[in-house]
Image (tube, rainbow, N blue to C red):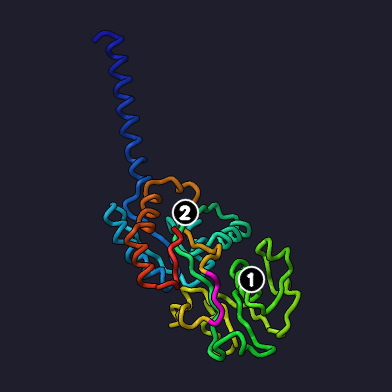
Amino acid sequence: MPLFLRRRSAIAALSLLSLCALVPAAHAQDKAAIKVGISIGNAEKIFEVVKKVAARDGLDVQVVVFSDYQLPNAALAAGDLDANAFQHQPFLDNQIKSRGYDIVPVGLTVTAPLGFYSRKIKSVQELPEGASVGIQNDPSNGNRALLLLQSAGLLTLKPEAVKNNTATPLDVTANPRKLKLVPLDAAQLPRSLDDLTLASINNDYAEKAGLSFVRDAVIKESPQSPYANLIAVRRADKDKPWAKKLVAAYQSAEVRQFIETTFKGALIPAF
């Protein structure tokens, strides 16, 4: 064989080998199965529908349920999860700032209006002076609870803290009913209702405790709040085909209809 033909054959063979080497990498990016971290309660019901929709697009969604808000981002950052769907943007921003996670949102899910619940009173007007009021002890949800108390006219916060979404009990400037603010872990608040007059409880924990936002909440956050939940992934995965499939499955018409008919305003599609 002439020398130039041998060279062409060698180049062609190398090109074919290079192409073959790229194929597994492309398939590795387009996973057939992923693990998604979610919180207990309503998210479990919604993801049963998400899983069915995603399966029709060739994606097997396996859920991992957490009862602690501090764990899903740590698991995602460590590579134990491919995605999570449990938090709103202010919570993610705070976790990135405090823990350095390289995690980004890829799609919105639902808005879960926050509520204050009680076993002792039925309305804000019945709230006695010196009442114990439980709020979340994590910065983003604690801030959210304090803003809701201010909107109900129960206390006043420093304007700067309101503007920056950084309110803590130390930012209370007026407390006419002398409320005793009790910061607790979010999961502990439903179990503490017998010891508190009023408690801020996130929707998923309220659901698990048999509480209905529509029926039982004494103070209700507006559905138009900025706290829409989201699907998050590691930054390196934000453009992967499986991430797009997951978002598309959640934001499908089938999932929207399920949310609207099942939760009747306690959860609202944010997409």
Q: Residue furthest right?
A: 173
Rendered location of residue 188, percent (x, y)? 54, 80
Residue 207 lies, with reference to residue 77, above or below; the image says: below
Q: Is residue 224 left or right of residue 137?
A: left
Q: Is residue 182 left or right of residue 79?
A: right
Question: What range of the chain is rendered magenta?
Answer: 218-222
Checking the image for residue 147, the label placed there is 1
Q: Compare marks 1 and 2 and give the one earlier in the sequence.
A: 1
Residue 84 shows up from this direction: no
The quarter of the rendered structure image containing the N terminus is top left
Residue 6 lies, with reference to residue 95, above or below; the image says: above
Task: Report if residue 123 lies within the magenta region.
Answer: no
Q: Residue at x 51, y 56 (%)?
A: 77
Residue 83 or residue 222, whichever sits in front: 222
Residue 1 or residue 164, whichever sits in front: 164
Residue 152 or residue 104, whichever sits in front: 152
Element at badge 1? helix
Residue 108 or residue 17, whichever sits in front: 108
Checking the image for residue 243, the label placed there is none
Rendered location of residue 15, percent (x, y)? 33, 25
Mark 1 touches mark 2? (CB < 8 Å) = no
Residue that numbered label 2 is attached to: 233
Element at badge 2? strand
The residue carrying pointer 1 sits among few (fewer than 14), some (14 to 19) or many (20 or more) residues within 10 Å by Cα, namely many
Amino acid type, callout 2: Val
The residue carrying pointer 2 sits among few (fewer than 14), some (14 to 19) or many (20 or more) residues within 10 Å by Cα, namely many
The quarter of the rendered structure image containing the C terminus is bottom left
